[in-house]
Amino acid sequence: MQANIVLLPGDGIGPEVTAEAARILTAVADLGGHEFQLDSHPMGGNAIDDFQNPLPPTTLASCKEADAVLLGAVGGPKWSDPTAELRPEQGLLDLRAELGLFANLRPVPVFESLAPFAPLKPELLRGVDLLFVRELTGGIYFGPRHEQGDGDVAYDTLVYSTAEVERVARVALRAARGRSRKVASIDKANVLASMRLWRRSVTEVAGAYPDVEVTHHLVDAFAMQLMRSPADYDVILAGNMFGDILSDEAAILAGSLGMLPSASLGSGKQGLYEPVHGSAPDIAGRGIANPIGAILSAAMLLRHSLELDAEASNVETAVAAVLDDGLRTADLVSEGGQAVSTDEMGRAVEAKL
């Protein structure tokens, strides 16, 4: 097949991990007789420096025309002034909104060979296979009013509509049908009116999926239960902010934030794929970043946007095989251990393919 894939390497370690994900996509194309056109475009802090815009119009236009978009990471201390008019993260929020990407899928793969790197007891990790479905274009991040007033008061508004909740709930329920048929919906319905609407809307949609068990959980209690008994859960549905926080918390189950991929999807096949980790400016340019989150994001791209499920599974199997062989990047190495570089990890996965 032919596919046009836009690469947005971004800032910090973004270019390093994106290069390894691109290496894997090229290998998949060569092995399968596919034709992938990979084009890089500026976004984030580097785009602010060069174009005074975190999402230049030419980048946005290319993303809209692409079959899929693969992002590295954006941001860093250089652009972290909270009073600045332009911030790298705004480019990412704008891109999600412009592409209509309302559902963020964040799988948490727990590899048996990495169990020693998680601070939980190994028995708690047996059978853990989570999928977070996070609403992506509503909630407090996109509320209509975000203001820092004069003096000591600032506020953001948390807004959800029934339609916004229902559409992301359907994504979670459909995903559950292909897994263990369980959805845990997260809210704060005991305090927030917007979350009472969330619970009511999820319950309404769940009626059309009688084969899926839906349970409702308050976010604070669930944060504890997620660490106490993670194997009890399968698909976890949450709003924008709660989903962001809980899925980062769950990275501890995988051993490192560098392991986790994500897919941002809308109503069609086009998607935005990115590792969950940030730009990690403290290690940028040192060749020690973990590229597995980016590589697994490329696998999600193959599965969801290009419908190449076998190829996606091959990439995931190759990653597992490399980890089983004992290869580790610096974030996964115990004190005194020997780590492989970003490039060496990418090449090892390519060789397994």
Image (spheres, rainbow, N blue to C red):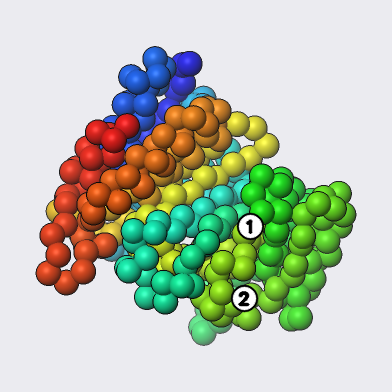
Q: Residues within 10 Å of mark 1 (few under 14, many from 20)?
A: many
Q: What percent of the width, then of the height, locates residue 333? A: 21, 64
Q: What percent of the width, then of the height, locates residue 234? A: 62, 59
Nearest the eye: 353 or 186? 353
| Residue 228 is at least partly visible in this image | yes
Determine which quarter of the picture holds residue 131: bottom right
Q: How many marks?
A: 2
Q: Is residue 257 above or below residue 74?
A: below
> Which of the labelled discs sits on residue 235, or is there none?
1
Q: Amino acid at mark 2?
A: Phe
Q: Amino acid at mark 1?
A: Val
Q: What percent of the width, then of the height, locates residue 251? A: 43, 64
Nearest the eye: 272 or 171? 171
Secondary structure of residue under mark 2: helix
Q: Distance of mark 1 from mark 2, alpha carbons? A: 13 Å
Determine which quarter of the picture holds residue 160: bottom right
Determine which quarter of the picture holds residue 35: top left
Nearest the eye: 76 or 189? 189
Q: Farthest residue to the bottom: give it.
A: 152
Q: Which residue is mark 2?
A: 222
